[in-house]
Image (cartoon, grey):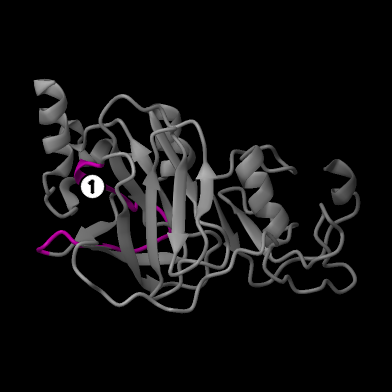
Amino acid sequence: MGAQICSQADAEMPREALRFHAEAVGAQVRLDAQRSTARRRATFHGGIVFSQRPVRPGERVELRVLCHERGWVGGLRVGFTRLDPERLTAPGLPPFVCPDLEQQSPTWAAMLPDGCGLTGDVVRFWVNRLGRLFAQVNAGPRLLLRKGVLMGAPLWAVMDVYGTTKAIELLDPTVSAPTPTTPWVFSGEPLPEPKATAGEECAICFHQAANTCLVPCGHTHFCSCCAWRVFRDTAKCPVCRWEIEAVAPAWDPPALGPGVGAQL
């Protein structure tokens, strides 16, 4: 009985506001003095950050997107990890939370769906006691990002200021702050793609324009929707089988050479 009362009291005790961990940050991250803002200086990766303390099941991690940078494909990743950032060294962090940190450690993260994470958007994410990772953008619906987070041990929030997401700010949910009233609506459909002209079709769907570059191999035979699906599913270039590290826009997509589509 005494242990039960103690456990309930601990659950009701106020926790310190979430801040970014001061030392365990990606190579491109710069924090402000209060450790509430994380900004990626350059390129599209090296933006991993952690909360300074563990997050309880059901506790909302709330943040605002401060800067959205065009020119990349994919944006903010959010999730949880059993890695204690106090025991991490910044030089040892990989460039990406997905899939690198997930493969190296007990970490569970996911990218927010296309079309959210624009400048001014407020994102909340949490994990419930069943190990399900949820997110909400502005006043939109609750989104199930993934299942299978292992519970039963402390979990720290992990975020990757990746791609189109240039800067984020952690918010204190106990302090009343304006939330955009326009909900972000998840349609489940990819964003509109430019239709292809003759000779510029995506080598996978043969419908949309080949407007995307796979990094580092540089192949540009795919639309962004198909390229991102390949990155997510296999992370191997369909043409040369090099491992894909990122997906970026190709400003001058070349015409497909003979037989390229047949190789896929």
Q: Is residue 155 above or below residue 124?
A: above
Span highlighted in magenta in the image: 33-55
Q: Is residue 63 above or below residue 226?
A: below
Q: Quick one: quadrant of the C terminus?
A: top right
Indicate yes or no whether the magenta region holds residue 52: yes
Task: Name the spot of residue 221 as percent of width and height, x first.
Answer: 75, 57
Nearer the observer, 90 or 253: 90
Among the 4 quarters of the image, the one containing residue 136 = bottom left
Which amino acid, mark 1?
Answer: Ser
- For the point 69% across and 58% down, which residue is it? 225
Residue 50 appears in the picture as rendered: yes
Task: Name the spot of residue 203 as percent of width and height, x first.
Answer: 82, 54
Image mark count: 1
Nearer the observer, 185 or 118: 185
Residue bearing the label numbered 1: 51
- For the point 58% across and 44% down, which residue is it? 244
Label 1 environment density (alpha carbons within 10 Å; few <14, some 14–19, many ≥20): many
Nearer the observer, 246 or 53: 53
Task: Name the spot of residue 81 as percent of width and height, x first.
Answer: 33, 35
Task: Name the spot of residue 139 as percent of width and height, x first.
Answer: 45, 69
Residue 94 appears in the picture as rendered: no
Q: Quick one: quadrant of the N terminus?
A: top left
Q: Is residue 54 left or right of residue 122?
A: left
Considering every residue shown, the one lying at the far front of the view is 1
- For the point 88% across and 67% down, which residue is it? 199
Secondary structure type for disc 1: strand
Indicate yes or no whether the magenta region holds residue 160: no
Among the 4 quarters of the image, the one containing residue 57 = top left
